[in-house]
Image: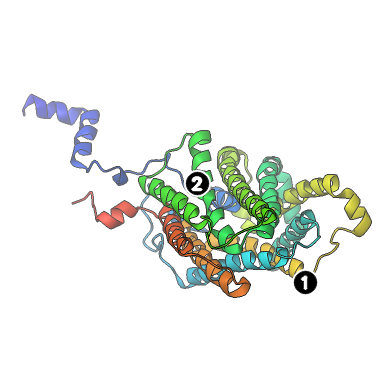
Amino acid sequence: MPSSELLRRSSPEMNMSSNAEQCPSSPVELEDPNVIKSKSSVDECFRSDVESSGAQTGDPAEKNEGAPAPANTVPAGTITAMGFKVLVLLAVQNCSKNLLMRWVMKEKPNFLTSAAVIGVELLKLVFSTSYILFVDKRSIGSIVQFMKDDHRNSILLAVPAAAYSLQMSLEYVALENIDASVFSVLVQTKLLATASFAVFLMGKTIKKVQVISLVLLTAGVMLCNMKNQNVVLSEEEEKGRMTGMMATLGIALSSGFASVYTEKVIKAQRNNNVARQNYSLAYMQVQLALVSLVIIGLYACIKDYDAIVTGGLFQNFNTGAFLSIFNSAIGGLIVAAVLKFADAVLKGYATAISVILTGVLSMVMFGTRLPINYFMGIINVVCAVLLYNARDLDRNVCGSNPTK
């Protein structure tokens, strides 16, 4: 046997190098463990934490992307019958939430936004507790035990809970000043915020296709927010428009920071967590709602104490305001259903559909005049959302196969 062949067989490093040379050099062939993954809510981070403990819910491909998928696993992006229902439900809820809130806030009602956020969290707490009692068929004592065993995470949740409460408060400010069609597009900059925070705070890298999607997103948002030369705004209207846009960008920044914080800090406590496979996502919803109620309650007492003492917490609330609260609370449950029956690809579809629906229905309901540049921008934004959440896109498009 030649000495070179003997040396090759006896050296694992050289074997690995030889194998690597036979594989294509394209970066999409190997999964980078540091590649950023989109997070749309605190619950998704909890979902991955549950799965890492052995729970058999959600998308199994997200448990270990390097491991081969079981034979009965639904491929990422495949829409099952239940997934399709969730897709439609989430798209309709996102669209109706923006339109309903715009309808309520367009006349600039004089109710407390802090009270609205408290109402949302109270309903989420009631709905989640009811799910535990009547669907999981477990007792209130199990919730108390969960909160006691997982008190560390309850403390850590204060930051994302505060960020989430801030987002809901800013939604009322934004939709009081700008159209739902503009809001639905501009708020998608949360993808850019999440990617930026993940790169600078966690040192992650992003996929090439995600870089392309962020460029498309930026271009789309700029197109959608270009001034219509045929419409002249007064100084007060221009000021309100700027306020709404800044509030929406605040929502995006808050969402991005909360998402990255949740992944960085809370996941770091995974080894200290309770056995989450023994609890459904409803327990995490209860946990988040309780922490949020404490935070927004303190904020309301500090900022709106005199108004609450004088006129009550839900002063000047009308039917539309209560409907918007109910819609937002239901949205939290729908997100939980999405995390159980769908994946990031499906959520991307739902977001894209809701952006389009919001723009079209805004014209019908409010007579919003949308110029051609808005529709050009919305195409960019929809493509950006789909690209950002895509998986193995280069491999699917190019058809590369390392085994060939």
Precedes in sequence: disc 2 or disc 1: 2
Q: Name the side, left or right, on which 398 lies relative to 109.
A: left
**Residue 18 percent coordinates (x, y):** 19, 35
Quadrant location of the N terminus in the rendered image = top left
Q: Name the side, left or right, on which 396 lies relative to 77.
A: left
Q: Which residue is mark 2?
A: 192
Q: Is residue 208 visible?
A: yes
For image coordinates 40% across by 65% down, the residue present is: 78
For image coordinates 18% across by 41% down, the residue present is: 22
Looking at the rendered structure, the secondary structure element under dot 1 is helix
Q: Which residue is mark 1?
A: 319
Looking at the picture, tell me which residue is in the foreground, 114 or 25: 114
For image coordinates 59% across by 45% down, the residue present is: 253
How packed is label 2: few (under 14 Cα within 10 Å), some, or many (20 or more)? many
Looking at the picture, tell me which residue is in the foreground, 121 or 318: 318
At label 2, the amino acid type is Leu
